[in-house]
Image (tube, rainbow, N blue to C red):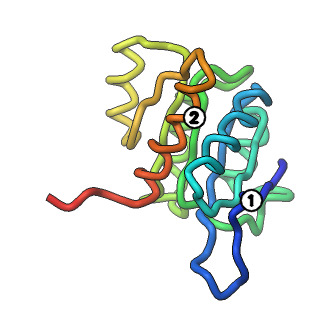
Amino acid sequence: MRVRLGEGLKPASAAPAARIVVIEDNPSDVFLLDRALKKQGLRFELTHLSNGHQALAYIRRQGVYAEAAIPDLILVDLSLSKYTGEDILHEIRAAGHLAGIAVCVWSSSQSRRDQSLLADLGVARFVTKPCGLDQFMEIGTVIKSLLAGPVPS
């Protein structure tokens, strides 16, 4: 697990940083996510879980994650080794302490089946991983809007 604080963090008197957990086995995608969030000027604390084992331990509050802070948002890659993103999503939804936490899935998959399955699991947003740097930077906008909460009608 690595925790990184966004560059824009201000002294403790400012509003708390958004806690974001990203479950992703590709370090390059995590690096680009970090850059995209910084580009948005978002104050954040990013916790990176690089595999399904770490993700399950975090969700179950086991070992080094026993006292982990509750996140504001969980971002899950669907294509993890050993455990699927779907396995992880089922665990998140079964964990009482994570009830009500926004969950966003990102994947290279553009399968409608994946997207409809995820809707059944209460996923707030499905994001297709972009192939270019400029498009990747737009993910920061999506994450910022999810952290802001629902838009009033």
Q: Please report the residue visible at 65 percent of the width from the left and 38 percent of the height from the top.
A: 33
Q: Quadrant of the C terminus?
A: bottom left
Disc number placed over residue 7 in the picture, else none = 1
> Helix, strand, or loop for circle 2?
helix
The x, y position of residue 64, in whole percent, is 85, 58
Taking 74 as reference, is 125 above or below it? above
**Which quadrant holds residue 35?**
top right
**Which quadrant holds residue 62?**
bottom right
Whether residue 5 sits left or right of residue 112 in the image: it is right
Using the numbered discs, state the Cα–Cα distance from disc 1 to disc 2 in whole angstroms: 16 Å
Q: Residues within 10 Å of mark 1 (few under 14, many from 20)?
A: some
The three-letter amino acid code for the residue at tag 1 is: Glu
Q: Please report the residue visible at 37 percent of the width from the left and 25 percent of the height from the top.
A: 117
Q: Please report the residue visible at 78 percent of the width from the left and 35 percent of the height from the top.
A: 50
The three-letter amino acid code for the residue at tag 2 is: Met
> Helix, strand, or loop for circle 1?
loop
Q: Which residue is mark 2?
A: 137
The x, y position of residue 61, in whole percent, is 72, 58
- Nearer-the-camera pick, 97 or 32: 32
